[in-house]
Image (cartoon, rainbow, N blue to C red):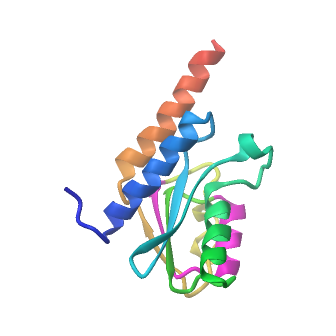
Amino acid sequence: MLELYTDQYFMKEALKEAKKARLAGEVPVGAVVVSNNNIIARAHNQTQLLNDVTAHAEIIAITSASNALGSKYLNDCTLYVTLEPCNMCAGALYWSQIGKVVYGASDDQRGFMRHGKEMLHPKTKLEMGVLYQECSEIITNFFEEKRKSLI
């Protein structure tokens, strides 16, 4: 059993969101924002549903967390996301001044780390690879199934 308030616990919660995205036919990325060991925002990709290329899990989670706190800054919050954020999401995370970003799977093609941690706010802490295997599998399996359906 996972202990509460660990990176693994909160990443499991983000994985639940990724599974919701997958069921909806979205790229399975999930995110949660945590403040004082409480989840204040949950989100998953909704680009298909909303017909909006910016409706990434991270963007929706940032907006929801900001609304919950009544602040555009998330200095004391941690974002847990199943896949390394893209450049757009890293930019939004920069402007939110989020305290910490924790991601599971790397995204070698579109992830922000290709350009370096400097894309995040200088005070933002970063942790990578939490529940890497589980986070990688959900995204890999999704795209494998997509390719098979095209054949």
Left or right, 107 with respect to 71, comes to left
Image spot of residue 29 (x, y percent):
55, 49
For residue 99: magenta? yes
- Please state the extent of the stretch shown in magenta in the rendering: 86-105
Q: How many marks?
A: 0
Which quadrant would residue 118 be assigned to in this image? Answer: bottom right
Residue at 50% in and 53% down: 106
- Work out which residue is located at the far top of the displayed protein and give it: 151
Q: Residue at x 68, y 69 (%)?
A: 63
Question: On the rendered image, what quadrant is the N terminus found in?
Answer: bottom left
Q: Quadrant of residue 145?
A: top right
The magenta stretch spans residue 41: no
Above or below for 150 versus 28? above
Frontmost residue, 37 versus 114:
37
Residue 100 visible in the shown view: no
Q: Residue at x 36, y 46 (%)?
A: 133
**In the displayed structure, would residue 101 be above or below residue 57?**
below
> Which residue is situated farthest in the left direction here?
1
Q: Position of residue 59 (x, y in %)?
A: 67, 63
Residue 30: percent from the left, percent from the top? 53, 53
The answer to whether residue 124 shows anywhere in this view is yes
User: Would you say 21 lies left or right of 125 here?
Assistant: right
Please name the residue shown 62% across and 33% down the image. 25
Which residue occupies the foreground of this view, 4 or 136?
Answer: 4
Query: Residue 32: where, in percent of width, then height?
Result: 50, 63
Name above or below for residue 22 compared with residue 86. above
Q: Which quarter of the rendering shows the C terminus?
A: top right
